[in-house]
Amino acid sequence: MKMWKGHVAVKTVITITDIGEAKIIPSTGQARFRTRYTAIVMKPFKGEVVDAKVVNVNKMGFFAMVGPLQVFVSCHLTHSDMKFDPSVSPPCFRSNDEVIQKDTKVRIQIVGCRVEANDMFAIGTIKKDYLGQIRDD
């Protein structure tokens, strides 16, 4: 389930506590119910550190998903020794001890968030200590 209200994404409804009286929507045959529920939500904020999965890599940076939130990490917000390597398949960002490519797990710090009508995007960084590739050792 994906609903946006303000800066919050409702990930899943846990319990429905109350369902109000139905109101018929004219000329559609549908009904609307006022419902109270308990849910797990996601509200990203600036400075938050999250674990994500890389979904796309290009020369400008990479995109990663944190649940329903898409985070872009620019090549300028990666470690200084990390370079884009287009010659391998799949393309990746590579340094002496890290490789970030599609399906890599990474730890990202959110530096900004943007909300649109039906979606939410964030900008992240891996430039600080303890951020970057997460190894499955």
Image (spheres, grey):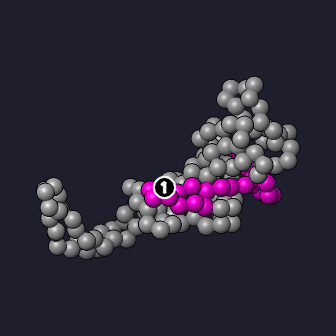
Q: Is residue 52 visible?
A: no
Left or right: residue 120 compared with residue 38: right
Secondary structure found at label 1: loop
Q: Residue at x 58, y 60 (%)?
A: 114
Q: Residue at x 44, y 56 (%)?
A: 118
Furthest-front residue in this view? 27
Image coords of residue 103 (percent x, y): 61, 39
Q: Which residue is mark 1?
A: 119
Image coords of residue 137 (percent x, y): 71, 45
Q: Residue at x 71, y 41 (%)?
A: 60
Q: Is residue 20 above or below residue 134?
A: below
Residue type for callout 1: Asp
In terms of image quadrants, where is residue 86? top right
Left or right: residue 90 compared with residue 18: right
Q: Is residue 118 magenta?
A: yes
Q: Nearer the viewer, residue 93 or 31?
A: 31
Per the rendered image, the range of residues in magenta is 113-136
